[in-house]
Amino acid sequence: MNVVMVGTGYAGLVSGLGYAKLGHRVACVDTDASKIARLDLGDVPFYEPGLPELLRDMQEAGRVVFTTDLAQVIDGSDVVMLAVGTPPRPTGEADLRYVFQAADEVGACLGHEALLVVKSTVPVGTNRRVLSHVREAMTATGRGELAPLIQVASLPEFLSEGRALADFFAPSRIVIGAEDPVAHDLLERLHAGVSAPLILTTLETAELTKYAANAFLATKVSFINEIAHVAERVGADVRTLAKAIGMDPRIGPSFLQAGIGYGGSCFPKDVSALHQLAGYNGYDFKLLSAAIEVNNRQRDLFLRGAEDVLGGFQGRRIAVWGLAFKPRTDDVRESAAIDIVQRTFARGAEVAVYDPKAMGRARSVLGDRVEYAPTAMDAASGADALFLLTDWPEFREVSFDTLREGMMSPLIFDGRNLLADLRLRDRGFTYYGVGTNG
Ligand code: UDX
């Protein structure tokens, strides 16, 4: 099939190259000319394992092109997919201006029957509004007779950064929301080669499913973080507890890692968008209010714990390992680590930071208010304390003897419990985890 993918962010680029790999011909469109130019040169503008190789393979196979000119590539397309950003407004609701701008642009140049697909995470009811935008734009540009032939389908993505290609080619399920069985069939064919259960449902159900999935996972994280606080008070270990409850298939082992809480470009915005959506529809979603509050409080409690032990941050040198919102990505959007760094230097500390992949993006947020160390060990040199804020596996491989000798005081606050099983107290450190009691 011929696919036009509008938007070349994480979801759009990964999905576009994924469809090309499945044998389709894909035209990726973005308004950002510099991003398109980089992609055209085979350069992926963010870190995602395996994506650069897939990009080059698909370009060599001639199955993907990049352009800023939608009109140039829309003719002959079977599917026009919107994968543009839906960032949160200050109120928490999703900002849909880019979705509707893209819909208006599609309608202004679509001259044949094609399936409109919304991959972006959007509030319930948005797919129908996108279809109206496209049909109205078609009518306004003289192709009103075609407009009724255009259908819309909701195809939410469930890609996790750092493992996006695995999630694309081996998803737990593919959710397709549409009114028209023809749309269900066409999207089933689009995914030929991906062996996963298909959920064929309505537009509204597909839209709400995406929010519910992320909100549940975020709530699970806040749950284990509250259990961690109880564990600390009663002398229990939250990691063993998480392993034990996760063995129950009804609970499952994932998203039970206690720490400084969730961040990223999805959980915070999707949880607040769902909370807003429920409120607009007359329902006060109490569990989500609590999950949000618990998550925000994690950062405060981490800092308060460190401040109590250090006797304040003024004049202290704090080393920070990890800035990305999670490992295997360079993404710092809504990163709890970045938030903690900002609060730490705001309290008068001198902060030295290191992250294996996110230094560049972190610098654009933190500016020159922190020291950017070339290695983890350099960051820790002369530090009064070490904050471990992103669980990059390489932080477990350092020489802890060298680390202890290099620090001003061998004090570690591990915000991800990455080092909790290394018995650092027996190696001369004062170690604090989250809910691990040592
Ligand atoms: C998430 C969903 O997993 C994915 O399905 C959806 O399509 C997009 O949003 P992502 O945002 O890439 O993916 O990251 P994820 O791996 O879900 O982690 C989100 C945040 O939760 C990270 O900050 C991570 O550190 C935190 N987290 C995750 C925990 O604190 N504890 C856990 O046990 C798991």
Image (cartoon, grey):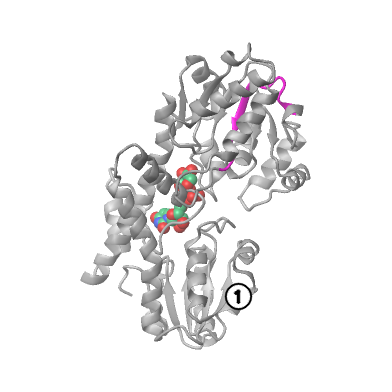
Write down the residue under mark 1: 369
What x and y, as percent, mark residue 308?
Answer: 36, 82
Tell me: residue 415, above or below residue 72: below
For disc 1, the neighbor class at 10 Å (few under 14, some 14 to 19, many from 20) is some
Membership of 76 in magenta stretch? yes
Give the dominant element type of the magenta stretch: helix, strand or loop: loop
Q: Nearer the viewer, residue 5 or 434?
A: 5
Q: Among all residues in the image, which is located at the extreme top? A: 145
Look at 33% across and 62% down and name the residue there.
Answer: 239
Q: Nearer the viewer, residue 19 or 350?
A: 350
Membership of 211 in magenta stretch? no
Q: Is residue 423 visible?
A: no
Q: Among all residues in the image, which is located at the extreme left? A: 234
Secondary structure of the residue carrying tag 1 is helix
Look at 27% across and 55% down and name the residue there.
Answer: 244
Q: Is mark 1 within 8 Å of ligand 1?
A: no
Query: Could you tell me the amino acid type at mark 1?
Result: Arg
In the image: residue 114, left or right of residue 341: right
Which quadrant of the figure has residue 12?
A: top right
Q: Is residue 102 visible?
A: yes
Q: Nearer the viewer, residue 401 or 39?
A: 39
What x and y, as percent, mark residue 52?
Answer: 68, 47
Which quarter of the image is occupied by the N terminus?
A: top right
Tell me: residue 417, above or below residue 163: below
Look at 49% across and 84% down and name the residue there.
Answer: 404
What segment carries the magenta color?
73-85
